Image (cartoon, rainbow, N blue to C red):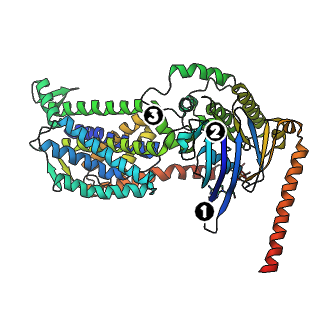
Amino acid sequence: MLALSGIRKTFHPGTVNEVRALRGVDLSIEPGSFVIVLGMNGSGKSTLLNAVAGSFFVDEGRIELAGHDVTKWPEHKRARLIGRVFQNPFSGTAPTMSIAENFALASRRGQSRGLGWALSPNLMQPLRERIAALKMGLEDRLDNAIGSLSGGQRQALTLLMATWLKPELLLLDEHTAALDPKSADQVIQLSDEVIQRDMLTTLMVTHSMQQAVSLGDRIIMMHRGQVLHDIRGAEKKRLRPEDLLDRFDEVRRRELLDESAAAMLNELYI
Amino acid sequence: MTLLIGALIIGLILALLALGVLVSFRIFSMPDITTDGSITLGAAIAAVLLVKGVNPLLATMAGALGGAMAGAVTGVLHTKFKINSLLSGILVMTALYSVNLHIMGRSNVPLMQATTLASFGESLGEWLAGGKTIHILGWPVAAADAAVLFLALIFTATAGAAMFAFFRTQIGTAMRATGDNAQMIRALGANVEGNIILGLALSNGFVALAGALLAQYQGFADAQMGIGMVVWGLASVIIGEALTGTRSLGMNIVGAIMGSVLFRLLVAIALRWGLNPNDLKLITALFVFAALVLPGFIERCKRRTTPAT
Ligand SMILES: Nc1ncnc2c1ncn2[C@@H]1O[C@H](COP(=O)(O)OP(=O)(O)OP(=O)(O)O)[C@@H](O)[C@H]1O
Ligand SMILES: [Mg+2]
């Protein structure tokens, strides 16, 4: 479904701000797989998702998605294959436009847009039903500006928008991190439902060990722009939060070791 | 009375300018100074074609098309060459000054003998009324003026309705979303750069349409006529928002039209009372300044006067 090979991305190359955010990522994801992406701050999780979505072009490597080589496709063209929910609830919706209009836009994700009316009757009927199923009382407020809703409501709607047309790949980047615990739980549950129901191939970034062990069928742990651990199958099922914390500790120790080694080399040779 | 009708007609024509500015300023949050050049461009193209004897409707549409192309150039400079939006507009506006002079061949093209939409309206009015004057609510009015006013009203109302309809289509909603949240609409597969180019073309098409009509009404096109026009359009949009009190698209469009007419009436009255025409642009600029700053200022004063809880 998704195949990454040798992905490299350096921001601001050749300057003092140079960041080697992705340093050779190889990853292959089967159709219908729900992959949790873990890693410390700055390990390259968001950069990985952005690279797949096409927010920028990668420096090296090849990205294949649903049988297409999308490495050189611009972001709006890849949108045909990809549904996305961002960390910031403000990012996924057009605030001054109504709920219905936002869904009208989502209902043509990746398709041509012409001079037909945006709000067609064949959209409104299923829209009302699916929004009623959220049990947030939003089905009577379809004409309200979406910017007037709470972060949790917006994030739930964004998820529904991203999956309105079944995407080949769903990208979730800490999409509950900005929410209060109760809304976060709601949105996580909704995500799991939608992903199971439509058997969506999914990449989900999170910092929650709890989510990591209870959701998905595979975990990849990023470290310094590479995939450090890849846990799947029976091992993933057995995994407890403590096991993950151990792996994080190991990463942290290695980091310290790297730093002290660098300091020693500095002292010795400079 | 003639003065009033004249102000109403110009207000309605410049409402098209206000609609254009509404698109760039409110939908794309981009004060687009291309406006100053494209209104003159519309006037210049229409005037030159009219003098050649081209059908007035065709000449008017050609003017609007010219404006749309100028807007598209601004859009390309901004999106493809990553030039700041304000600077892109300034570059095109400056270039248009020369372009307009080339099109006109001199700095002023009079339309005295040519058949224009205005002269067509005037003769239509006199033919329908069967005389030079008619009575509206007991007032004697030149039939020619009444007919032109009526035509202007229909023209502007149609344009406003067309714009409203357009922004409710699939492509129109995508364009509104582009101004509202570019990241979101890109993730939904719309070409943000293309939408901005198209939006600025649409905006300047409306502006140039206003220019083409204005030239026909006042009977000449002039190289200087665009100066300060974007500020004029902003003033109309802002007055419209104050009048309708909302930010919904339909009311914004109605508001911009009403704002333009009201602003023109106020100016006509002020000029009648002895305002120096040279001060007009200064006062328009001060007005827009006040309208931009006052709401925030009042908000701060309110907060200061309400005791902290
Ligand atoms: N657009 C960008 N320009 C410059 N540097 C960037 C950009 N995006 C990411 N980086 C840098 O790349 C590195 C990886 O960032 P990334 O956002 O992928 O981390 P992350 O794993 O998502 O971290 P977090 O858990 O904090 O979200 C960081 O050092 C970051 O500063
Ligand atoms: Mg991140």
Label 1 CB less than 8 angstroms from ligand 1: yes
**Residue A102 percent across, percent down from the top left:** 56, 33
Q: Separation of disc 3 and disc 1 at Cα?
A: 36 Å
Mark number, residue A84: 2
* Chain ID, mark 3: B
Where A150 sits versus A246, above or below? above
For residue A79, side relative to residue B264 (left or right)? right
- The C terminus of chain A lies in quadrant: bottom right
The residue tagged 3 is B171
Classify mark 3 as within 8 Å of ligand 1 or not, answering yes or no: no
Frontmost of labels 3 and 2 is 2
Residue A12's tag is 1
Looking at the rendered structure, whether the residues under marks 3 and 1 are on a common chain is answered as no
Give coordinates of residue A123: x percent, y percent.
55, 22
Give the residue type at disc 3. Ile
The picture places residue A94, in percent across and down from the top left corner, at 56, 38
- Which residue lies at the image location 30% right of the left edge and 45% below the top edge? B67
Q: Label 1 sits on what residue type?
A: His
Identified at 50% across, 22% down, the residue is: A120
| C-alpha separation, residue under disc 3 versus residue under disc 2 | 21 Å
B147 or A116, which lies in front? A116
Give the amino acid type for the residue marked by disc 2 in the picture. Arg
Tell me if residue A134 comes above or below residue B198 in the rendering. above
Dot 1, how many residues are within 10 Å of its Cα: few (below 14), some (14-19), or many (20+)? few
Q: Nearer the viewer, residue B293 or A18?
A: A18
Q: Chain of mark 2?
A: A
